[in-house]
Image (spheres, helix red, strand yellow):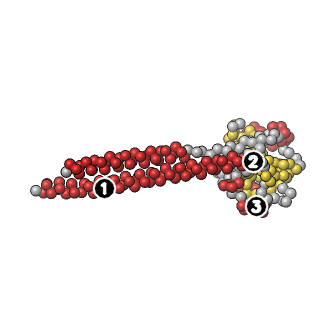
Amino acid sequence: MSKALQETSERRRSPAKVAIFCLCLALLAAALAALGTWQVQRLAWKRDLIARVDERVHAAPVPAPAAADWGKINAADDEYRRMTATGTLANDRETLVYASTALGPGYWVMTPLMLADGTAVLINRGFVPTDRRDAASRREGELPGQVEITGLLRMTEPKGSLLQANNIAADRWYSRDVAAIAQKRGINAVAPYFIDADATPNPGGLPVGGLTVIHFPNNHLVYAVTWYGLTAMVLALLVFILRGEIGRGRRE
């Protein structure tokens, strides 16, 4: 008698377990679908970003932001904008920042451009190979007097790279940290951005400008398809279970 009661009790509990399991599947499907929708939104955002940056890169250059406008500068609205700045290069205060480029390993030459109003803008004049890191080996490329630099506005890269922190005391640099470089070189009133110089050749061929890499990974469509595919699989399993339960109910 007790065995029969136990079997009856298990049958009574079984629909509840199935209902809970189905509810969990439904919630999982909803979560996966939400992730897919989020990736679709990210895809639209990324495409808009790429279009905006492409427009900036190919637009006519504008004057570099003055000190009064420094507080308004941000990556979303200004990074990779083409601009010009006129001043005198402080070649004796250049900073070498480790670089890995299409031309091989070497250094970015970061040189302060001293402006007429007493402020400064840090200029990434371009790449030099390791065996030409010594400024004495490329004196002809150290432009004297007033110069006009054209290039792309870039945002500061504080602290260091993902793999290596800047060693300020030892003067070893792995990222273009504007504030830290300016402090190390004793430069006051420096812009919170730097300018990547364009490919205009320098005397002697160094530094080599125009090597800015503009690349925005855009895998959001693949991610969206993946999440929606998983959603479809979970829903198919849910339908399979529900159909089985309905069929069993009819047989009983």
Mark 1 lies on residue: 19
Q: Amino acid at mark 1?
A: Ala
Q: Give the label on residue 69, or none.
A: 3
Is 65 situated left or right of 251 in this image?
right
Q: Secondary structure at mark 2?
A: loop
Residue 175 visible to the viewer: no
Residue 128: percent from the left, percent from the top?
Answer: 75, 40
Residue 205 visible to the viewer: yes
Is 184 situated left or right of 116 in this image?
left
Where is residue 138, by image quadrant?
top right
Is 72 situated left or right of 63 in this image?
left
Mark 2 lies on residue: 59
Q: Amino acid at mark 2?
A: Ala
69 in relation to 43, above or below: below
Q: Amino acid at mark 3?
A: Asp
- How many circles with numbers are drawn on the protein? 3
Q: Secondary structure at mark 1?
A: helix
* Distance Cα–Cα, label 2 vs label 1: 60 Å
Q: Earlier in the sequence, mark 2 or mark 1?
A: 1
* Distance Cα–Cα, label 3 vs label 1: 61 Å
Q: Earlier in the sequence, mark 3 or mark 2?
A: 2
Q: Secondary structure at mark 3?
A: helix
72 in relation to 216, above or below: below
Q: Nearer the viewer, mark 3 or mark 1?
A: 1
Residue 83: percent from the left, percent from the top?
Answer: 78, 50
Q: Earlier in the sequence, mark 3 or mark 1?
A: 1
* Distance Cα–Cα, label 3 vs label 2: 20 Å
Mark 1, Cα crowd under 10 Å, few <14 / some 14-19 / many 20+, is some
